[in-house]
Image (tube, rainbow, N blue to C red):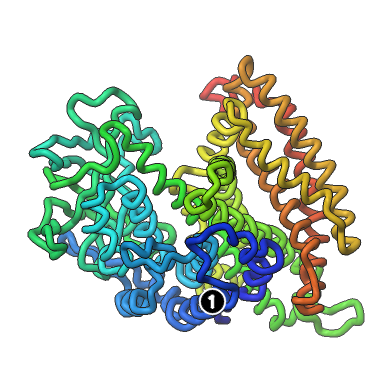
Amino acid sequence: MSSYLAPLDEMNFLLNQVFSIQNSYEKIGDFSEFDEELYKAILEEAGKFAQNVLFPINRSGDEEGCQFDNGLVKTPQGFKEAYQEFCLTGWPSTSGDPEYGGQGLPKAIHVLVEEIMYSANTSFYLYSSLTNGAYQAIHAHGSDELKSLYLPPMLEGRWSGAMGLTESHAGSDLGIIKTKAIESEPGKYKISGTKIFITGGEQDMVENIVHLVLAKLPDAPEGPKGISLFLVPKIKVNADGSLGETNNVSCGSIEHKMGIKGSATCVMNFDEAEGYLIGEVNKGLFAMFTMMNLERLSIGIQGIGLAETSYQLSKSYALERTQGRNSQGQAAKIIEHTDIRRMLLSQRSYTEPSRALALFMGMQVDIQYHHPDQGERQKASQLMALLTPIAKAFFTDKGYEACNHGVQVLGGHGYIREWGLEQLVRDAKIAQIYEGTNGIQAQDLLVRKVCLDKQGLLSNLYQIIEEELKNDTRCSQAEVLNSALSQSLHDFKDTTEWLKDNFVQRGYEIQGCAVDYLHAAGHIICGWLWLKMLNNLNENVSDEFVDRKKLAAEFFTHQCFPLVKVFCEQIKSGYQSTSNARNDLI
């Protein structure tokens, strides 16, 4: 089986030529000590760690899975040792606040590191991803005492984080959760209830696990407005930061899953466990969404990472496998067959602009939290609100599609375990489901971010795309794409206004088109970023790199971009057959 190699040339091209990160951050003092050479070195080290430590235990971790015995979870062989090295080399702290032991690197660099880690071993990296999300929520909403006590060991990697939202009867309807919180003394609460599908809720790689748990106080209002957020450690923490006695937190079982088998998915029981309020009473969802939205971006990046690995493995196979004859009657490598080329280019045509969008969003997070200008911070916050559901759903839909293409390229060898493609499909599937299913993301985009939007969230995105359309094109591929993007953006705007006009009278029916609308938006954004990449090709990249970019962009323009028109036509055709039919006829 081929190995994984981090796409460092792609990442450095985005950082330095496409987004000019050094110039973009010149007004952000927190990043003034960092430069392009440091970023390059960090990505190189991440690539080495992923290739040499994580990828070799990916398949074995899938085959062994996690083991559950009397409340304890054992991770697959090699995970503990890899995690120790992961911590020793500083990966848990990359974008953490230096006040608590973090390295203070930009989120833009962290999203690229995330992709590398997800590509090599998704199950392994999920533990760290959830820890990072919990860290962000505590950092944003926790008291100074909680932050000083919990954040340093989380950034060291000695303690991990977990997110306790889902309950068996509630699913995505968090307003009907049953987990209760009772104040036992000022500042302390007793948390009781059961949560399911908790990634990393129990595991054997860390000293302590910090659970962020949604619960309701006895006098809380009904529905989502009555939810509060609590920090509940597996092991209680003394005032000096040392570990105390065991808290009443236990793992009831772990799930037996389709994929991500090296990641423990737990049923967690809280039996009057000691917890501490994060944020304000009854404002738990507001605090938790700090974690959830960053996790949604992270899970989107999981889709990109798996798509990249699928592309690498399937291309490697296509370059080696001989099958049939070429036009000269000679034995042909299967990469010479046009249908194989179609699938390989399809993987690239979505993965590369998705990576660009993830980096762009990482930069928006940096601007949102570090830029000195309030107007810039507000603009970045609005862009993130709009782009988060698109990124989560579009990245993971296209990631799953890319992994299926990879299996198809290998044919029968893709369906068996040897080459690892079937594992990628299984690992990619969950990304379309957790952190809010992709259908829910589409509803969020259509209803909240577009039809009910009072801030004009789309206007900022329109402005950015239209500015790119005004730039001089540098090649014929860019000229053609510029024209196609201009027309597609016009169609998308027209469809958006149609949706807004019809939403009040036909809201429930129109919601049936939400996934189509999200995918139309995803294609528009990919078109913008392909154009931006083509317009920034210069002498700093090789001729081969330029030719590869032009080929994939041309494929996207002619084979993928026309779908925008199809989506817009489907949206306007209405979904009465979906919304009005009797249930028994569906």
Numbered disc total? 1
Quadrant in the rendering for residue 53: bottom left
- Viewer-proximal residue, 3 or 253? 3
Residue type, label 1: Leu
For label 1, the crowd category at 10 Å Cα-Cα, with few meaning under 14, some 14 to 19 and many 20 or more, is few
Q: Position of residue 414 (x, y in %)?
A: 59, 70
Kindly identify which residue carries mark 1.
38
Quadrant in the rendering for residue 497: top right
The N terminus lies in which quarter of the figure?
Answer: bottom right
Q: Secondary structure at mark 1?
A: helix
Residue at the image point whose x is 34% and y is 59% from the top = 131
Q: Determine whether, in the image, residue 126 is placed left or right of residue 35.
A: left
Q: Position of residue 380 (x, y in %)?
A: 57, 46
Q: Position of residue 94 (x, y in %)?
A: 43, 68
**333 w.r.t. 434: above or below:** below
Residue 124 shows up from this direction: no
Residue 306 shows up from this direction: yes
**359 w.r.t. 284: above or below:** below
Residue at the image point whose x is 32% and y is 43% from the top = 165
**258 w.r.t. 170: above or below:** below
- Viewer-proximal residue, 43 or 347? 43
